[in-house]
Amino acid sequence: MNGENHRVDATPSSATPVPPPPPAPAPLARRLAPPLAALAGVAAAFTYVGTVDPNEPGHYPVCPLLRYTGIYCPGCGGLRSAHAFIHGDLATAFGANAVAVVGYGVFAVVMVMWLIHAVRGAPLRPSWRGAIAPVWWWALGGVLLVFSVVRNLPFGAALAP
């Protein structure tokens, strides 16, 4: 070896590179901005509906499906339900639109989860977004369809607004 230094590379070529560290989470105020903005928008809408009574004619448009066909859609009675809910009259709220009242509860749970995840700095990734997501969406559509049909039949008059 005629005086040449042969250098052997210490890192093997089959080694996997180390991934970079995850980025630092955004400041708390920036993480809380989206859920608090959504909550503020919903609170503003509920405040308006709580102030302006949907039982008084002329304040809100009439449901086009109800106006032209006489059929209650899944949302019919939703404003009256929200108005009663805001004023603490749960029986009237359920009577106006039971699905809407359940939706208020689901919304509250999702908002709490979103706020907790925002405070922790973790993204909100619901487990239902996985492989079973289509099943949940079809089930929700089925429930709304059954609710809509039943509330328009004589025996389901208790579900009509």
Image (spheres, helix red, strand yellow):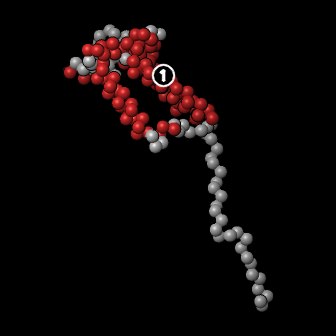
> Residue 119 versus residue 15: which sits nearer the camera?
15
Dot 1 alpha-carbon crowd within 10 angstroms: few under 14, some 14 to 19, many 20 or more: few
Residue 90: x percent and y percent? 45, 11
Secondary structure at numbered mark 1: helix
Q: What residue is drawn where x is 33% and y is 12%? A: 158
In this picture, residue 142 sits left or right of residue 23 = left
Label 1: which residue? Answer: 105
In this picture, residue 1 sits left or right of residue 13 = right
> Residue 76 versus residue 99: which sits nearer the camera?
99
Q: What residue is drawn where x is 29% and y is 10%? A: 57
> Residue 35 versus residue 76: which sits nearer the camera?
76
> Residue 3 versus residue 127: which sits nearer the camera?
127
Q: What residue is drawn where x is 22% and y is 18%? A: 70
26 shown above or below 160: below
In this picture, residue 126 sits left or right of residue 57 = right
Residue 123: x percent and y percent? 56, 39
Q: Residue furthest front?
A: 155
Q: How many marks?
A: 1
Residue 69's image quarter?
Answer: top left
Residue 48 appears in the rendering: no
Residue 133: x percent and y percent? 44, 39
Q: Residue furthest left?
A: 68
Residue 77: x percent and y percent? 34, 16
Q: What residue is drawn where x is 20% and y is 21%? A: 68
22 shown above or below 86: below
Q: Which residue lies furthest to the right in this view?
A: 3
Amino acid type at mark 1: Gly
Residue 120 appears in the rendering: yes
Q: Residue furthest bottom?
A: 2
Quadrant of the rendering where the N terminus is positioned: bottom right
